[in-house]
Amino acid sequence: MMGIGSRLAPRAEWFSHPCRAIWARTRPLKGASVERLFSRICTGSLAILFVCVAALAGAQGRKLGEVTDEWGNGLEGATVVAEPEGAGGARQTTTTDDNGEFIFLNLSSGDWAFTATLDGYQGLQQVANVTQTGRSRPLSFEMPVLASGGRFRERTEFEAEDGTPKFRFEEDGKFEFEDGDGDGEGTYGIVGLSAVLIVRDYDGPDDKFTLQTPVVVEFANNQFTSLTHAGVELPRR
């Protein structure tokens, strides 16, 4: 007959060695069970890894902005460069989309210098602080137009016999006009006997003019006595 002390001895050993008790009561896993267990462990590990990566990505700073002309038109294809000024990180470059907007991601905290450039416009630079919260104010570059050709030395106007269309050129490189659909304004440059006009604001049909498609008018002679637009001659006033 087994005494009381003998019956309790194994259980006392289990309590003193919990792992030994668990292994003693666990049956060996078969091949399929091992594969399922391994699959579950891998799946759980990958999920944790993705959560960690997402958290790290979300903690990175970013900077939004837009590049426009003086009339508020978004400038497509402008180059924007971000360079750290005391902050960590490497120089980054991006270009604006068709709305003139851009974004930088994965910027470290601190001050960054942002420079916007585009052919035909004066380049601009701003220094802004980047934070990991991403709540900083968006950047806004309003780029002045550079001279692209000659200009009249004084206000010069041309008008059709019936009053429309008509153009008025200013000495600062800007012009105003009126046609059968509305009024507008923009910038110009004289090349030879032609003037290249960029319409930047127009209250007529939205699709009539674009920044990418200049309007070209022809002058009659070096004295600019008249110009021709869309087949209509406009004498100088």
Image (cartoon, rainbow, N blue to C red):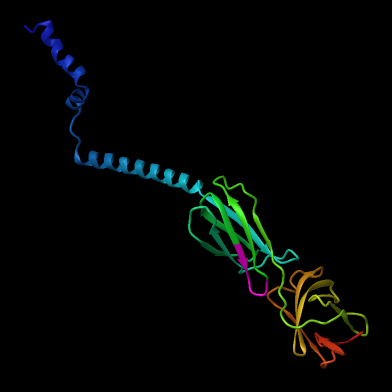
Quadrant of image for the C terminus: bottom right
Image coordinates of residue 194 in percent, x first then y, are 76, 87
Image check: 175 left or right of 128?
right
The image shows residue 232, relative to residue 188, as above or below, that is: below
Kindly give the residue lying farthest to the front in the view shown.
86
Residue at the spot x=21%, y=25% of the render?
A: 19
Q: Is residue 119 magenta?
A: yes
Kindly give the residue lying farthest to the bottom in the view shown.
221
Residue 113, quarter of the rendered image: bottom right
Magenta range = 115-121
Quadrant of image for the N terminus: top left
Depth check: give the residue in front, 174 or 15.
174
Image coordinates of residue 78 in percent, x first then y, are 61, 68
Depth check: give the residue in front, 117 or 73.
117
Kindly give the residue lying farthest to the left in the view shown.
1
Image check: 104 left or right of 175?
left
Query: What number of labels is visible?
Result: 0
The image shows residue 132, relative to residue 202, as above or below, that is: above
Residue at the spot x=81%, y=72% of the render?
A: 185
Residue 58 visible? The answer is yes
Residue 32, quarter of the rendered image: top left
Q: Is residue 82 magenta?
A: no
The image shows residue 124, relative to residue 222, as above or below, that is: above
Residue at the spot x=51%, y=49% of the render?
A: 60
Image coordinates of residue 227 in percent, x first then y, are 83, 87
Depth check: give the residue in front, 131 or 23.
131
Residue at the spot x=87%, y=90% of the render?
A: 225
Residue 97 visible? The answer is no
